[in-house]
Amino acid sequence: MASVEILTPRAGSGSSGGPGRSSRSLKREVGLIGLTWASVGSIIGSGWLYGAQKAVVVAGPAAIVSWIIGAVAITLLALVHAELGGMFPVAGGTARYPHYVFGGFAGMSFGWFSWLQAATVAPIEVEAMIGYAGYFSWAKSWQNPDGTLTHTGFLVALALLAVFVLVNFLGVKALARVNTSATWWKIFIPLLAIFVISAGHFEVSNFTSHGFAPFGAKGMLAAISTSGIIFALLGFEQAIQLAGESRNPERDIPRAVLGSVAIGAGIYLLLQLSYIGALPGSTFVHGWANLAYKGIDGPWAGLASIVSLGWLALILRADAIVSPGGTGLIYTASTSRISYGMARNGLVPQLFARSNKRGVPWFGLLVSLGIGVLCFLPFPSWQRLVGFITSASVLMYAGAPLAFGALRKRLPEAERPYRLPLGGVIAPLSFAVAGLIIYWSGWDTLRWLAGFTAVGYALLGSYAWYAHATRKPYAPRMQFKSALWLPVYLLGLGLISWQGGFGQGAEGHIGLWWDMTLVAAFSLAIYYWAVNTALHAEEIQANVAMVEVVDEGGH
């Protein structure tokens, strides 16, 4: 099988606008800095504004360990994505790798997870912006006491989402310029807060006075998924989603992915250390779970105020608009590129693959606006949104280690601009870690995710049936046999979560550590099952080549 040559998809190739219309393609206008800053700008968003406070409430000072575990987990996943991103520099890559290797059913599933994740990040960032703005009298009417949006707040949220979409309509070059400027600010402000606050207010005793790990290992592990740690570290894949618009993707994608993780993880770990050390003892006198101080709804700005750094508090309030806003801007772009990629794979209508004269998949942008608005309804608070998106995100990321392992097995000699050392060890390990993160998010979150997964199967499955029934030239081949492991994986994780001890409604029949051992073992079994039943090299080549099939008119 190794002799089969992989047909690398022309990532910039767009779909035609329909019968008789000329093809428009994505424009390759983004360099290494633009790609790196797209990922860094996504990593440093509302997570830095809330992550340290949410994590310490759940885990105590042991939140530091939670951040380290989260950083290691994300690094493992990023390493796998770096090799795949170099091999397949296509728009919406995370939605397409499983399709190439396991066929249409797997592609439909992971495409939905990818799109669901991207579409819900921008609303999360808007929620963070509104939450911080509540400090000012003119914005107090935007949120109810329980964190839900008022009618006025809903209109403001809609307007902010609309701004994200409008900027994206200007094209990827303009988007990269706006995001690069915003990202320099987003890096500088957290570092300024760390240095200024820690220089005058840092108590080492804060780390042990109420116990380093007052909530034990369970609290430390739960914090990874539920308090925003994994959510904060997400975003490295933005360079991959924009790969179809990269000037030199084979060289730049791996560098951008790995570099962004290093920058983001370093900043977040320093933020957690600084936050714990700077808190006055009176703020957690009743324990970390009851952490309280004036202005805690905007954790860092409130902390700056109580340590007499009012000027810094004002800067942080301004940053609460820039940081989440920049992240929301990039994820809005990512949402449209993922739906573009799914259209190129024949999983959604070709309307999603149409681009305007600036090379922007315009219909995907409009749909992202509509779906983003709906996200304010069932998930009103930032932390509930985070819990849901973390699970959807890790399900999305879990497809890459499987595709990586299968490609190493089926096509060991294929060209790889970046070849991951010890890939045979890192890939199954990263898949097991993904399973653990999903499990730690809790049964209550997974129930919601299961419902949205069912909705995705209904929508995409119906379209696949329609495409086949009407004999569309781009109708996807489902290739169920190579993806039989997928429903077993999803149902198995759900069953373990239900019987485990994380999240509301969990039965607690499987004890701590035994549950994680079971998740890891189950994940490894799925990994090797998937890798060994993946499509053969010729079939993988055929799926990769499918992206060159032009849409409706068959031209």
Image: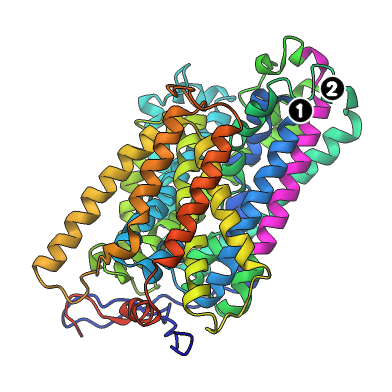
Q: Are marks 2 and 1 in contact (CB under 8 Å)?
A: yes
Q: Is residue 274 magenta?
A: yes
Q: Give the image quarter of residue 8.
A: bottom left
The residue singled out by tag 2 in the image is 208
Q: Residues within 10 Å of mark 2 (few under 14, many from 20)?
A: few
Does dot 1 land on a helix, a strand or a loop? helix
Asked if residue 215 lies left or right of residue 110, the reply is right
Marks 2/1: CA–CA distance = 8 Å
Q: Quadrant of the N terminus?
A: bottom left
Residue 61, disc? 1
Sequence order check, earlier mark of 2 and 1: 1
Q: Quadrant of the C terminus?
A: bottom left
Tell me the amino acid under the disc marked 1: Pro
| Magenta span | 258-282
Q: Is residue 203 visible?
A: no
Residue 319 picture location, percent across and down: 65, 41
Residue placed furthest toward the top: 286
Q: Is residue 283 visible?
A: yes
Q: Residue at x 74, y 37 (%)?
A: 65
Classified by dominant secondary structure, the portion drawn in magenta counts as helix
